[in-house]
Amino acid sequence: MSHKQFCVAVLICAVLFIGFALAQNNTKPLTNDDVVAMVKGGLPENTVINAINAQDSNFDVSATALIKLKQQGVNSKIMDAMLAAANKKHSAAPAPAPAAAPAAAPAPAAAAGQPSVTVLKGTTPQPIPVSKTQIAQTKTKATSLNALSTDNALGQAMQSVAMSAAQEAAYRSGSYTGASAIGAAGGVMGGLMGHRKPTVTDVWALPGQKSDLVLDSNQPSFEVHFANIPGVVADEYEPALVKLAPSPNNFRLVGATQAKQDVLESSTLDWEIYSSFIEERVGAQATKVSSGEYKLQAAAALPAGEYGVVLRPLNKSKKFSGSSVAQNSGEGLLFNSVWAFAVK
C-alpha cells in the first residue's frame, strides 16, 4: 500500500469513527440536567421546548425532581413539555402480552406488592380499579374539603400537576413502577422557593369530577387486600370509606393536611401525615379477616355522590417519609391509593 493510499484509509476510518461517535451521542436521551444546562445557557424557551419534542428523553418527573427544576430556574412551560414527553414515552411503550385465561375464576386477590379492592355484587366480587391521587400545594388553610374545592389557586395548582390519561391508565392497570404525578404547582408556589420553608396545605385529589364506576347498590360491601406490600406492616392499617368533594376545576378532593413546603423532599420518617388530616369519613364497619385482608361494609345507605375506599394508619401519629409519598412507594403507595366509585 502506498503512503497516499494509507493516508486515505486512515482518513476514512477517522470519518467513520467520528460519525459513529456522533450517532451514539445523538441517541443519548435528554435528561433533567440537559434541560437545566440549556436554560442556564440562555437558550430561549421555545428552543428548549422544541429540543425536548425533537429528541428521545429520560426525564425524572417525580415531585422532588420537579421542585428542584423550579429552583434551578426551569419555568412551568418547559416542565409541562417534559411531562408531556414523559407521558408520550409511557404511552408508546408496548403493552404486555395478555395472560392466558385461568381455568377457573376464583375471587380476585391482591397481586404481590399491590393493594386491591373488590365490590361484592351478590356473592360475586368485582375488582375496582385503583385511582392515582395527585398532590398540589396551596397557601389556603384547610378548614374543609368543600371549602378547598372552590379555591381557584388550588384549581390552578392541580391543573399544573395533572398527568395525561396514558399515565393514569398505566397506574390503574397496576404499573406502580413509574414516577408519580405528585408535585408542587409552579404558579402557586413560585413565591415560596426562598430559604425559609413556609407551612402550606397539601391536597390529595383525583382527576375528573365523576368516577367511571357507578354502583348499583347504595350500601355496598367490599373486600380489601393489602398484604405483602414491600415496606409496609399491614397490621398498622385498616380500610375506610370516605366521601370525595368534587371541584369546579374538574377534580375530586380526597383529603388535605398542613405541612412544610419541602416535606415531600424528605426521606426521614418524621411526617405525622394523618395526625391532622382532613377528610370526610363515612360510617362503615371494617372486619379484619387476616393480616392485610378486610371486609368493609357501609353502615347505612349512602346518599348520591362520589366516594372512595382508602387505607389509613390505625395510629394517627404514625410517621411517614415525604419521599415515599412523593414517589408513590411503600407506605406512600398505600396512603395515596383510592378506589373510587359513585352512588346515584
Image: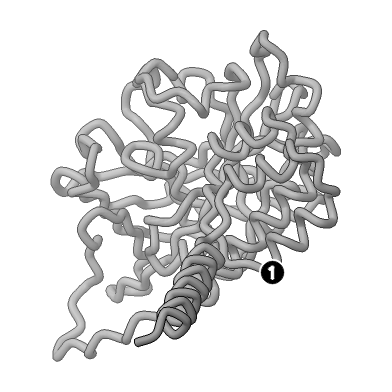
Above or below for 125 versus 259 = below
Tally the numbered discs. 1
Residue reaching furthest to the top: 196
x and y percentages locating residue 202 in the rendered image = 62, 29
Above or below for 138 versus 52 = above
Quarter in which the C terminus is drawn: bottom right
Element assignment for label 1: helix
- The residue under label 1 is 54
**Does any portion of residue 60 appear in the rendered image?**
yes
**Does any portion of residue 305 appear in the rendered image?**
no
Q: Is residue 108 left or right of residue 313?
A: left
x and y percentages locating residue 113 in the rendered image = 25, 53
The quarter holding residue 66 reads top right
x and y percentages locating residue 297 in the rendered image = 37, 52
Q: Residue at (38%, 56%) from the top-left corner?
A: 176
Query: Badge 1, how many Cα within 10 Å: few under 14, some, many 20+?
Result: few
x and y percentages locating residue 342 in the rendered image = 59, 62
Q: Residue at (72%, 15%) from the top-left corner?
A: 194
Q: Residue at (32%, 86%) from the top-left corner?
A: 97
Name the amino acid, label 1.
Answer: Ala
The quarter holding residue 33 reads top right
Q: Is residue 146 left or right of residue 320?
A: right
Above or below for 23 versus 266 = below
